[in-house]
Image (spheres, grey):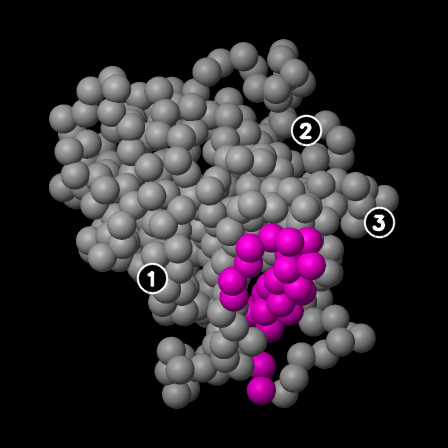
Amino acid sequence: MRTLRPLRLLLTLTTVLTTALLAPQWAPAATDDGTDGRRPEAVREKRLAPRLVELTVDSPALGREAKVRLLTPDGWERRTSDDRWPVLYLLAGGHGDPEAWTQDYAVHELPQLRDVLVVMPEMPVFGFYSDWWNQGAGGPPGVESFHLDEVRPLLESRYGAGTRRVAAGESQGGFGAISYAARHRGLFRAVASYSGFVHPLQHPHAVKAGLDYMGMDWRALWGDPVAQRANWQARDPYYLAEHLRGTPVHLSSGDGAAGALDPPDVEPDPHVPGLEDPADPFPEDVVSPTEAIMGEESRTLATRLAAAGVPVTTHFYAGTHSPPYWSRELRGSLPGLLHALGVPSL
């Protein structure tokens, strides 16, 4: 869950709610995979910069078109059908906007990525990198199916993506990277989470509060955390720790207090009713409750992974839920991700 600062929140909230309200309604699927039988297609390609390409993908899993941005490696334009590049998947937070990786983190300026295909897929707002339960009916948004069953094969068949893959993400994207790796063993060689929502069942009230705040039906995601607990556990990395054995995992997060990369007059997160657990109030110095929750979950998961024999590294610090920290953490974890891909880091 990415908590936006007040001005950005006010500018985007209307669009977010409109998107949620106008999302296509689910209709019974004609096939077992939750789609209508169509294969996804890149319906449009747009060159945004010398190495930046945007694909518009017609997604049966989402029931609409969605964007995928590619930061292409050197020589990609001259590729043949046999050329394959190692792939870094960068997964956005709750806003779901792939533009953040270039606008906020300037990944296109990193020389280490000139031999890597960087994939930055869209996610529906607060999509939680999951195929939604929808009261047992299934159907859109099928976020996991879009990313792994539609985008990945499309890129590997037409855009030079190889089978050496790693993934990293911020906020909900951190959850996505680790949950995908745990649910699909061998898919990624290493994963990293920056302030990730990596143990949702530790704070189910926070999932409810975030989706309520966005005007969305929180039970449509995984159901009720008691009645449909199995749905939650099937996606929660804490309960899938053994599945990550052999996959290096990096976890980083702040504690919610103002830190080195926050301005002296840092503004508190917008108030989200229900985010704070009355039985476990935040410390007085916390200005970013969202980050305090992410920090608790990251620490809990790190302990669980270590006990399960998973190779886990961590970086915990004082700081808020904001892009300057994620930019720093991405750069700090990049050598490990590139090593897993077999790509030298500069």
Q: Is mark 3 on a helix, strand or loop?
A: loop
The residue that mark 1 highlights is: 331
**Against 20, is 257 above or below?**
below
Residue positioned 15% across, 33% down in the render: 75
Mark 3 crowdedness (10 Å alpha carbons): few <14, some 14-19, many ≥20: few
**Against 26, is 297 above or below?**
below
The earlier-in-sequence mark between 2 and 1 is 2
Residue positioned 35% across, 30% down in the render: 162
Please name the predominant secondary structure of the magenta segment in the image.
helix
Is residue 209 at least partly visible in the picture? Answer: no
Amino acid identity at mark 3: Val
- Foreground pick, 340 / 78: 340
The boundaries of the magenta stretch are: 285-314
Distance, label 2 to label 3, CA atoms, is 19 Å
Give the label, 2 or 3, closer to the camera: 3
**Which label was assigned to residue 138?**
2
Amino acid identity at mark 1: Arg
Q: Is mark 1 on a helix, strand or loop?
A: helix
The residue that mark 3 highlights is: 226
Q: Is residue 133 left or right of residue 294?
A: right
Mark 1 crowdedness (10 Å alpha carbons): few <14, some 14-19, many ≥20: some
Res. 299 image quadrant: bottom right
